[in-house]
Amino acid sequence: MGAEVSWTLRDHAGALLADLAVTDGDFPWLYATVRPTEAFAPLRPIFDAELRALRRAEDGSDDGAWDRAYQQVRAAVVLIDPAGVAVPELLLHVDGDQAWWRWSDEPFDDDDDEDGAGSDSAGSDAVGDR
């Protein structure tokens, strides 16, 4: 991909959790190698639980568990773009040393969701080939 582009994960207090070195992109997704700091270790179970819930949802057996698991991810991290700006909305998955995400420069408006799919529909295609 040329020169390395890195995003960062921080906690809400600003502490660095991980660098995300972009390895590929397939709009709207970016893929990266995770370079965690020691501060990331306590969050690993949150990401693991989110992936388990996502895979169950993709198998059609979701009871809202993915939404609950993903809210824990969102409560734990802030995604910072290469310019140093926190993105207001994101859908982030971490599996081992790999991460993939999509983001928006503007907050999502849940009121526009007339079919009730909410963020669950955003996660349903999130595992892909990774």
Image: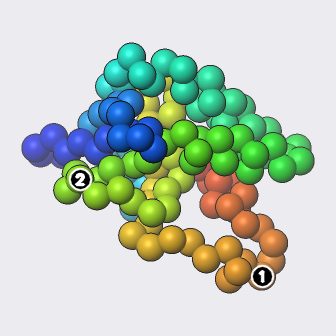
Q: Nearer the viewer, mark 2 or mark 1?
A: 2
Q: Is 33 placed left or right of 126 in the picture?
A: left
Q: Which mark is residue 49?
A: none
Q: Amino acid at mark 2?
A: Gly
Q: Is 87 placed left or right of 128 in the picture?
A: left
Residue 8 position in % (x across, y down): 32, 41
At 77% from the left and 67% from the top, the residue drawn is 117
Q: Quadrant of residue 26?
A: bottom left
Where disc 2 sits, the SS reads: loop
Question: Can residue 22 be spotted in the picture?
Answer: no
At 65% from the left and 53% from the top, the residue drawn is 123
Where disc 1 sits, the SS reads: loop
Residue 3 position in % (x across, y down): 10, 44
Q: Amino acid at mark 1?
A: Glu
At 29% from the left and 53% from the top, the residue drawn is 81
Q: Which residue is mark 1?
A: 114
Residue at the extreme front:
13
Q: Quadrant of residue 56?
A: top right
Q: Which residue is mark 2?
A: 84
Q: Quadrant of residue 31?
A: top left
Residue 118 position in % (x across, y down): 73, 66
Sequence-first tag of 2 and 1: 2
- Residue 18 vertical position relative to residue 70 in the rendered view, above or below: above
Q: Is 113 placed left or right of 33 in the picture?
A: right
- Residue 78 vertical position relative to residue 102 in the rendered view, above or below: above
Residue at the extreme left:
3
